[in-house]
Image: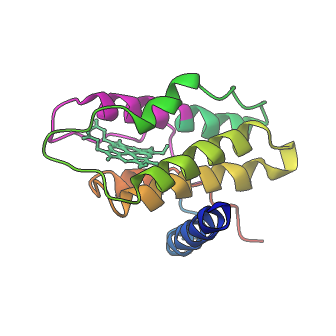
Amino acid sequence: MKYLMKTVLIFLLLIAGILAFQVVVPEQSITMAVADTTYTNPNGSSELALLMREMQQYSNTAKADVKAGKTPAPYPKEFDKIHTAKISESMTKSEYYKSFADLYIMSVKNYTSSAPAERIETYNNMVNSCLACHSQHCPGPVPVIKKMMIVEPVK
Ligand code: HEC
C-alpha cells in the first residue's frame, strides 16, 4: 500500500514536471508583479474556494520571500482543511483529489523546511502541485497559477 502511494506520488510529480516544462518561458515571470493574481470565481465562494485564496496568498508571499532571500513563513495549519473543505455545488472531487491534496501539503512543508539554496526549486514544486490538481479540477485559475512560477534567468 505504501509502495502504491509512492508510485502515485512519483507519477503526479512527473505530470507536474511536464506542466512545469511547458511553463518555462525565459524571462517571463521573474519580474512579474506579486499582485498579478486576479481571478474572478464564477461559482461563488465555497469553503474550499476561500481556502484556495489563502493558499494563493501564501504562495504569493512565498514568491516575494524567495526573491528577497527571506525565511519561509511556517506551514499554515488550516491548509490541512484542503481534505475536508466543502467544494462548490457545481464541482466534484475526482478519485485522485486526495493524492493531489497530499502532494500539495507535502510540497508546502518541503518549501518551509528547505535550505536557502533549494528555495526556488521547492517553491516551484509547490506551484506545480497546484497545477497538477488544477489540470484535473477547476481549470479556470490555471493561467494565473502558471504566472506564479519563478523562472530563473537563462545564463
Ligand atoms: C487538491 C486539489 C487542489 C490543489 C492542490 C489546489 N487547488 Fe485550487 N482549487 C481546487 C478546486 C477543486 C477548486 C474549486 C473550489 C470550489 O469552487 O469549491 C479550486 C479553486 C481555486 C481558485 C479559485 C478560488 C475562487 O475564488 O473560486 C484559485 C485561485 C485556486 N484554486 C488557486 C490555487 C493555488 C494557487 C493553488 C496552490 C497554492 C491551488 N489552487 C491548489 C483544487 C486544488
Image vertical order of residue 117 relative to residue 113, above or below: below
Residue 148, position in %: x, y?
51, 50
Q: Residue 31, can we see it?
A: no
- Residue 56 in the magenta stretch? The answer is yes
Instruction: Tell me residue 79's x, y (percent).
Output: 51, 31
Task: Tell me: 132 left or right of 92.
Answer: right
Q: How many marks?
A: 0
Q: Image point 41% across, 59% down: which residue? A: 96
* Placement of 120 over or under 19, stated as above or below: above
* Residue 8: image location, x then y, percent: 56, 67
- Position of the C terminus by quadrant: bottom right
Q: Quadrant of residue 71?
A: top right
**Residue at the spot x=77%, y=31% of the render?**
70
Left or right of residue 117: residue 53: left
| Left/right of residue 12 with respect to residue 46 in the rendered view | right
Closer to us: 104 or 127? 104
Q: Quadrant of residue 38?
A: top left
- Residue drawn 42% across the image and 41% down it: 36
Residue 82 on the magenta span: no
Give the residue displayed 16% in from the left and 32% down from the top.
44
- Image check: 130 left or right of 116? left
Residue 51 lies, in percent from the top left, at 39, 30
Q: Quick check: 138 above or below 8?
A: above
- The quarter of the image that holds ligand 1 is top left
Rendered position, 6 above or below 72: below
Name the quarter where the N terminus is drawn. bottom right
| Magenta residues (range) | 29-58
What's the magenta bit mostly, secondary-structure-wise? Answer: loop
> Does the image show residue 79?
yes
